[in-house]
Image (cartoon, grey):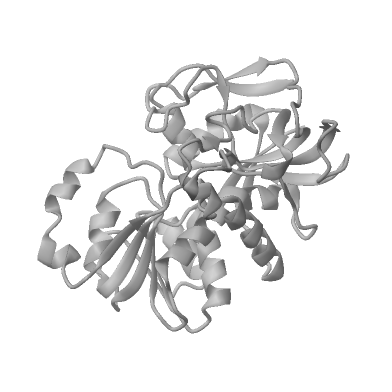
Amino acid sequence: MKAMVLNKICSLEENKNPLELMNLPDPVPGEREMLVKVSACGVCHTELDEIEGRTPPPHFPVVLGHQVVGRVEEISSKSNKFKMGDRVGIAWIYSACGGCKFCLEGNENLCSNFKATGRDANGGYAQYITVLEDFAYPIPSIFSDSEAAPLLCAGAIGYRSLRLTGIKDGQNLGLTGFGASAHIVMKMARHKYPNSKVFVFARSEKERNFAKELGATWAGDTEQQSPEKLDCIIDTTPGWKPVVEALKNLERGGRLVINAIRKEEADKQYLMKLDYPTHLWLEKEIKSVANVGRSDVKEFLKLAAEIPIRPEVQEFALEEANKALVELKERKIRGAKVLVIR
């Protein structure tokens, strides 16, 4: 099979082609696994974290990609949840132990044996992938393959982030950054909380204009003050500056949810500007989001089909994966980037 392979950690600023197009043996499904022929795979900022070593894969070479859509091509003898030809999705959660207190409580995203698609196991930047049947999801027919791909991570993690804000209808929501996840959160928030206003902070004028097109009440630069205090904010950026700036706009007793696996070091010095009375006092909260669980993916796909949420996508061929990653690094973003695999 054709695959775009990461062989080592590197800087995308120094190496614009971190992935190598290779021919690999087709994977063979194990017990309770399925072989899936990949048709689309979303491109996520987490791939940048893997390439540049902030979330390093445990081994090399590795195939990245964890927003995978494809069709079941082969089923092991003990698998019975899907049939040949079924369209399925595969998300960041590749597996969890199933027996620890976190898994038993429904918090498998916190399992110490959590394994990630495209990091701990080969992902969807390839023609084929294997997956445990319990960690695959039926894709609602309303979505095309390319539309469905970003729902599996950008959408699911956005769903979890919005839930963790504790927002109530009528409260003000802030979004820092306006890429793949944030633009889906915007569509979801406007449906679930019709009386809430959404305020967007983004460095790029294109992102701010895009936010306004989708119904943002206000959109400004990262350092600008919002015209109203915000009851909750979701940070979807890779930096620290937006976090510190967002806290200034948070209402008393408000909550900032950080939707990122890792933060880049480039502006870490900005944390030195964190001032307790300005940024944290009066019972403001900061909460991180760790991965997603299967329930997040299942519940969000159902909700996305009901609304429906159709993400804006830019399509690239598998061989153009490096181009898509560099554009993401350089914040050339409008919606989500998706690899189409033939």
Q: Residue at x 73, y 34 (%)?
A: 341
Quadrant of residue 77 within the rendered picture: top right
Counting the numbered discs, the total is 0
| Extreme residue in the right direction | 84
Q: Nearer the viewer, residue 123 or 313?
A: 123
Q: Residue at x 75, y 34 (%)?
A: 32
Q: Residue at x 70, y 70 (%)?
A: 306
| Rendered position, 3 above or below 112 | above
Residue 283 rendering spot, x and y as whole percentages: 22, 71
Left or right: 157 with respect to 10?
Answer: right
Query: Quick check: can you spot residue 214?
Result: no
Q: Nearer the viewer, residue 319 or 180?
A: 180
Quadrant of residue 232 within the rendered picture: bottom left
| Rendered position, 249 above or below 296 | below
Screen quadrant of the N terminus: top right
Quadrant of residue 191 within the rendered picture: bottom right
Q: Residue at x 45, y 27 (%)?
A: 51
Q: Nearer the viewer, residue 138 or 264?
A: 138
Query: Quick check: can you spot residue 317?
Result: yes
Residue 189 rendering spot, x and y as whole percentages: 52, 71
Residue 233 rendering spot, x and y as whole percentages: 36, 65
Left or right: 209 with respect to 242?
Answer: right
Screen quadrant of the C terminus: top right
Q: Nearer the viewer, residue 179 or 96?
A: 96
Left or right: 303 with respect to 169?
Answer: right
Residue 227 rendering spot, x and y as whole percentages: 29, 77
